[in-house]
Amino acid sequence: MRGGRWRRAASQIGRSVAVWAVSTVTMLVLAGILPDFRLQSADGESATHIAVTAAFGAGAFGVLSALVWPLLVRLLLLVPALVLGLLVFVLNGSLLLVALRLNPASSAEAAPETAVVVAAVMSAVASATGAALAVRDDDAYRRRLYRLADRRRRRLPPGPSAPGTVFLQLDGVGHDVLLAAVGKGVMPTVARWLGTTHRLTPWRTDWSSQTGASQLGILHGSNHDVPAFRWYEKDTREVMVCNRPTSAAELQRRAVEHTGDGGLLTADGASRGNLFSGGADEQALVLSIATRRRGRENRSRAGYFAYFSDPANAVRTALSFVAEVGREMGESARARVRKQRPRVARGGLYPFVRAFATVVERDVVVAAVMGDMLAGRTAVYADLVAYDEVAHHSGPTSRDAEKVLERLDRALALIANVAEHAPRPYRIVVLSDHGQSPGETFRSRYGLGLGDLVRAGCGLPVPRRAQRTHSGAEARAAVRAALRRPVEEGGEQHRPSRRSEPLVLASGNLGLVSFPDVPHRMSKEEIDARHPALLTTLANHPGVGFLLVRSEIHGGVVLGAYGAEIPLDQLDDEPGPLEAFGPGAADAVRRTHSFPHTADIMVNSFHDPADGEVLAFEEQIGSHGGLGGAQSRPFLLSPVAFSPPVEDGCDLVGAEQVHRVLRRWLRETNGPQVPVGTEQEERAA
């Protein structure tokens, strides 16, 4: 403890000396440029004397700015804003003149108007230098955010306050990946919590193991009729995509209608960096409100403006962004030189997308969460997408991904430290929405994509160079929302080009085949009559694990290699092709079969239980979206002060059950959840 205090003190002294040195050089440069500002007498003085004069003046100006400026600002609070804006420059120049006069041996002079210019330039340079040096200093960053958020601090009722709850979602981090990172010392904050204050619980996703389905279920209590990341709806003739703002808004509307409840965060909650709002009044970087047209109600980008309005934040994040772009380029080049396998393309704009997810999105969301805690909000839910984006392209257990986990652990430590200064105690819950399963892509192993295989099974021509599938990574949608670029510009297909041809969509290692010209969900018998070789071609392919289709005789059947055909109600006795996918697979498949918008053919890729490998139908070497391996096994890290998520010997299954657990914890902490507006109206009455 004492050693850490000394290190922080030494770091602060080092930064102060560096800022002083840069300010001295700036003063010397300005003295050489500006005619009415000099650091020597008319007769001339030695270089040493001039340097000492500049150093003394820069130091005195810095001390006066630190000590006197806060007092002057307090005295001028009643001055009109326009007058105060002008006085800022005059007072800053006056402080510089005082600093120059404090050295009796100095013959430095400056005209009043020149002093204003010199003071402004030196203040800007000193601020930028200090911020740049503090880029890697989390303590300095935390203190600055605390000062900035202090003005927004709300007054809570007197007496002990009920604890607030912060839910931090580490997107894509599987249960086993988290344990491995803790074991390697990559995540010391999580390791410390596991040994003292928190318990770790694995949970099992639905068949659609992706953020859209999981987060909708966690925040709104229902992910009914979300069969995948993308799917085609025959009644509206539209492709739904979970990370498209219009689709996210519609999915949220359906969930609220299905449950009759606004969501997890309806009582004094905040939603940060999520696909859905959870019913929170305070929302920033929430995709479901990031509509394509500008509007007063659209506050999805408010978090960016709030964060970057502070120049120190901008400098910190900009420098880290540039460093991350360079890091990705270097790691990608090394992977190519070493001929690592599996490997996917990481060129083009990807380095910038990765830097956005791992730096910009992380910094903005973490700052927003800290502000919510310092403002005393009751419940906060935030999504950090950094790991998920990197693991898609580098692999779930790669060195790149471990580095991201290390930085996420530092973010958790920052948030925990800020909780010490919050106006109420906070309990921090860390969870993930899904994991990721490793493996090469379906295309790289077999030389063709799922769409090519479907066309071949239908007897249609297969193009030699088929278009690659689009990635379902959440970071890309966040980038488009931040820049106000429509998601559709990324090439996402909304409507099938030819109604007579099958529409094939990919969601990690889950594929969906629909026939748009048939208004209902086709049966196995109808598909066989139309394309006799299609189902056999798919089921017998070595890269396919199993198929789900509707049967006119059995209701729903699972198809596998060598003619395997098992009705859904017999899967418990005879799992057949589902045996390799572990416990719960049959229930997940049966639930998806009941959805109104399940595709005509649901295709789950091959899975090797020995090494956890799956074959993604997208261009990803770490994937999620279907069944198989770590993707279906996320985690829930909760304070032991809460009741256990499930009873001993029971499994936590499905995002909807996770929602019920989080709801129970909020009730344990805060009592019955009453929306803030309703409570205020009752008091007024």
Image: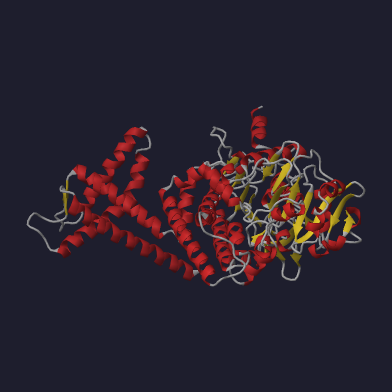
Q: Is residue 572 left or right of residue 603?
A: right
Q: 588 and 378: which one is in front? A: 588
Residue 80 falls in image quadrant: top left
Would you place residue 177 above or below residue 418 in this image?
Answer: below
Residue 285 falls in image quadrant: top right
Residue sitting at x 78%, y 52%: 602
Q: Is residue 468 visible?
A: yes
Residue sitting at x 85%, y 55%: 558
The color scheme shown is secondary structure
Q: Position of residue 124 (x, y in %)?
A: 32, 50
Q: Position of residue 386 (x, y in %)?
A: 57, 57
Image mark count: 0
Q: Is residue 11 left or right of residue 399?
A: left
Q: Quadrant of the C terminus?
A: top right
Q: Position of residue 281 (x, y in %)?
A: 61, 38
Q: Is residue 436 visible?
A: no
